Image: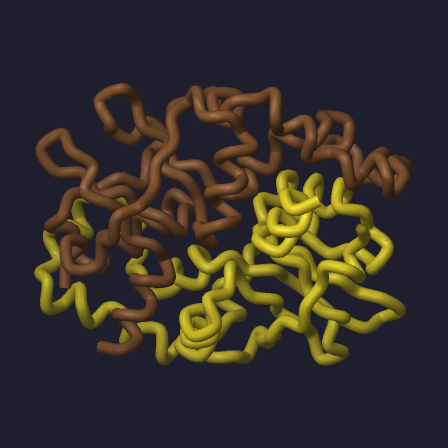
Chain colours: A brown, B yellow
Amino acid sequence: MRACDLLATFPTVTADTPVIEAARLLAGQDLPGLIVVDERGLPVSILPGTQVLRLAVPGYCLDDPALARVVDEKHADAFASSLASRTVRQALPPERRELPVTDPDATVLELAALMARTHSPLVAVVEQGRLLGAVTLQALLDRVLAA
Amino acid sequence: MRACDLLATFPTVTADTPVIEAARLLAGQDLPGLIVVDERGLPVSILPGTQVLRLAVPGYCLDDPALARVVDEKHADAFASSLASRTVRQALPPERRELPVTDPDATVLELAALMARTHSPLVAVVEQGRLLGAVTLQALLDRVLAA
């Protein structure tokens, strides 16, 4: 069993996609994360859902849970409105890290090692400069446990 | 909107649960992670799915992607068999970190800040020494984006 047997097409966003659209995509399709592609359609980042959410949370609430607590319910409910003015670019990590990207020949062991090492429930599969799709942790576990 | 409006019951495991059972629970119910509880039923850890998978991968494959590549397909397919002999205890992080646990009064802003800060798509909700359930990133996004 190899990545080509497990992959499925997966929606992509670009650095210019508004965060609100990215959040709708995550929620609407129950995705574990998002593949951010460049103008050639190749992955430049794989964003876990929690890091998309991060953009909607004011910095003082990230640093100090006690400060998030003092914001009343009405204002807390409105926090998502700040998503509208931001783009995915602002959610990208500043440093270059290993990307969970592999080729269609990767075995389930390689996929599992890549997910575990990069803490990503999602691996993008690329062949000859083209994004073929992605393998999710769910797809991998379903197949490995059924085998 | 508060945690009590968003929470749903959520399956739990203990440190003694075999990893293969934990993996089946993750896969079978499409969970973003697992709540590990102690003998009182209170959360001691929230494990993302990728860290459950980590236990099934030999250390040399985690450290060096090239070594995962040399394992042939047949042996790679069998990697999940190593899950059978291990328990969740071995997947728990060694250091004490902030747990994504809150109370039923937490606002959506507090929940979002907690998920973003702890990189957890899952927050356990506890009241008076009792686990009430969990709020997932999906549930949070669904409600916040619909509002």
Picture quarter containing residue A69? top right
> How far across and down, in percent of the image, does residue B97 sit?
66, 48
* Farthest front residue in view: B146
Question: B59 left or right of B4?
Answer: left
- Front residue of this view, candidates B33 and B15: B33
Question: A19 left or right of B59?
Answer: right
Residue A91 vertical placement versus B81 (above, below): above
Do we see residue A133 in this rendering? yes
> How far across and down, in percent of the image, does residue A111 sit?
26, 53
Picture quarter containing residue A74? top right
Do we see residue B60 in this rendering? no
Residue at 13% across / 48% down in the picture? A104
Residue A104 vertical placement versus B81 (above, below): above
**Which quarter of the rendered picture does the N terminus of chain A lie within?**
bottom left
- Front residue of this view, candidates B12 and A136: A136
> How far across and down, in percent of the image, does residue B121 sit?
57, 51
Picture quarter containing residue B16? bottom right
> How far across and down, in percent of the image, does residue B66 sit?
17, 44
Residue at 55% across / 60% down in the picture? B47
Residue A26 vertical placement versus B127 (above, below): above
Residue at 71% across / 80% down in the picture? B39
